[in-house]
Amino acid sequence: MINLFDVMKKLSEEELKEQGALLETLTMTNLSKQTSQKVAHKLVKATNLFAGLMKKEPFQTPEVLTIEERLEQNKQKWQAYAREEAERSLKELLKVRCSKLDLSRVEEALSEEAFSILILEEAGERYDLKEELLPSQKADFIAKFYQREIKEIRKELEKQRSEDKEDKEKDKEDTNPNEEAQEEAKEEQQGEEEISEIKCLMQLGLGRNKLIRALFARWITLCVQVCGGQMTVKEEALPSFQPPRERIQREHDYQELLRQHQRNEAEYEKVLHSLLEADQNLSMKNKVIDHEEKKQLEIQAHIEKLIEERKALNERIEATRQDLSHRANKEEANELEQIEMQRLTKEVKMKEKQMNTYESMLAISAEEVEGATRSIELINMNKEECIAPLLKKVADRRAITSKQLEEEEEKRQKDLVEKWQLAYKDFIFDEECLKSIQDFAPYELLDIERALLELHTVQDKKALSWGEIERKEYELFEIEPDGQSLEHMYLSLYGGEIIVLIYKVQAEINKVKIIKVLKV
C-alpha cells in the first residue's frame, strides 16, 4: 500500500495531531526565533544589571519561548481540531513542506498516491535509498533507519546527561546550599524523565531539508507501525509463493533435470562430433581416391606417350641402319652408324628410364587408392556398428529430458498464468512478457510479483511510472515503435540487479497491459 493518506486514517487522533503540531512547530523560522530570543534575554538582563548600578528604571526582560513551549501551544491548538479537519490540515502542511512538490505548478489532479511517493522520495534522500526501490520498500527502510537514528541519539543524550550529572556533583562544594537543593531536585526530576523524541529530533541536524526530511520520516514511521510494522507485501501474499521446503525441493528437482539434460546434450554433441569427424574422414579419403585415380590417368598417358616415342626411336634406328648399309664407303658408314646408334640408343634408354619412373609412381598411387579404400571400409563399419547406434541412444536420452524440460516449463508457465490472472485481474499480459518471465529465478519472480501487486493495488496507475518511454529507448528495450504510449518503472531485485517493467495504461477499458519485463 503506497497511499500514506489512507494509512493516516488508521492513526490515533493523538498521533495525527502531534504530527501536525510538530510539522507546524519545528521550522527553521521558529528555531531562529528561539535563538534570537535567548540572545535578547541575556542582553536585557545585562543592561538591567548596569541600570541598577546607575539607579535607573530597568527594562522589561523579554520572555523566551522555547521550542518545547511553542510545540505545547500548537498541540493545544491541534487538539481543538476535529479528526477530518486535522487530516486536511496535515495534508496541506505536507504540501507546503515537501520540496519535491512545486506549489506554483501543482495540479489539482495530483493523486494522493503520487503525492505519497513524492514524500517517500523526499524522506528517502535522507538515507540515500536506491531510486529503484518500490514505494512500500522505501517506507519500510525509512521507518527502520529513523527508529535506529532516534535510538542512537537517545543513547548519546542519556550518556551526556549522566556525564553532566557527574561533573555537577564534583562542583557541589562551590554551590549555595539553597541553590544546590533546588538544582538537585530539578536534576532528579530530569533524570527520571525519558529523553523525548522531540529532543532527539532536534539533534538530527539543522537545515530546512534535513529537518523536514526527519519529520517526514517520523510520519512515515507512524504509518508503517500502524500497518503492523511492514508495508512491503509479504512473500506469503504473492501468487508464486511456496513454502520454503516445497520451493527448494521443486527447484532442486528442476535444476537436477536441467543438469541431466545438459549432460545428455553434451554427450549427444560429442557423439555427433565423432560422426561428423568420420564423415569428414570419408570425404577426405574419397578425395584422395579421386585425386589418385586422376593422377593415374595422367601417368598412364605419359607412359603411353613414352612407349610411342620409344617405338619411333627404334624405327629410326632400323631406318638409319638401312640407309647406311647402302653407302659405298663402308668405313665412313660404320663410323656414322656408330655415332647415330649411340645417340638414338641413349634416347631410347632415357625414355625407358622415364617409363620406369612413371610406372613406380603408378604403383605408389595404386597403393594410396588401396589404402584409402581400406580406410573407407573401416570408417563405414565403425559408423554402422558403433557411432550410429550410440548416436541413437544418446539422442533418445536427450529427447526424453528435452521433453521433460519442455513439459515442466509449460506447466510452470501455465501455473503462473493462472495465478497471475487470478491475482491481477485488471492486467493483460503480453505473450512475449510471459515467455520472458521464464528467464527469472524463483526469488526474482517474487520481486517482480511484488511490483505487479503494488501497481495493481494503486488507483493512479501512472503514480509508479518513471515516465513515458522515449522513442530512442524503444530500440534499447527491443520494442516495436507502433505509436503506443508506454509507461515504465524500474525496480531492484533481491540480488541487486535492476529490471524494467514496461506497461500500458488502457484507461478506456480500465486495464493495464504488461508489455515486457527485462533486466537492464
Image (spheres, rainbow, N blue to C red):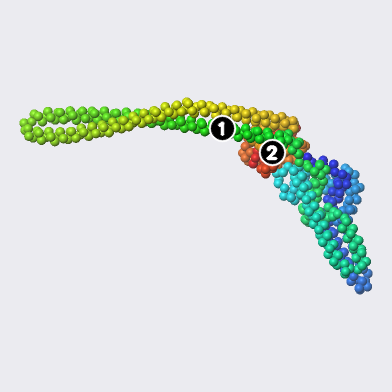
Which percent across, then down, holds residue 391? 52, 28
Q: Residue at x 85, y 41 (%)?
A: 10
Q: Earlier in the sequence, mark 1 or mark 2?
A: 1
- The residue under label 2 is which amino acid type? Tyr
Residue located 17% across and 29% down the image: 316
- Residue designated by label 2: 443
Q: Secondary structure at mark 1?
A: helix
Q: Is residue 176 visible?
A: yes
Going by the image, does 45 lie left or right of 492? Answer: right
Would you say 405 lies left or right of 46 here? left
Tag 2, which secondary structure? helix
Amino acid type at image mark 1: Glu
User: Which part of the image, by quadrant, shows the C terminus?
Assistant: top right
Q: CA distance from mark 1 to mark 2?
A: 27 Å
Image spot of residue 89 (x, y percent): 85, 46
Residue closest to the eye, 258 or 194: 258
- Residue 453: x percent and y percent? 74, 36
Q: Residue furthest left?
A: 328
> Residue placed at 67% from the left, 40% from the top?
500
Residue 265: give its label: 1
> Going by the image, does 373 lie left or right of 476?
left
The structure residue drawn at horizontal position 65% and vertical position 33%, both measured from the top left corner, is 253
Any part of residue 432 in sight: no
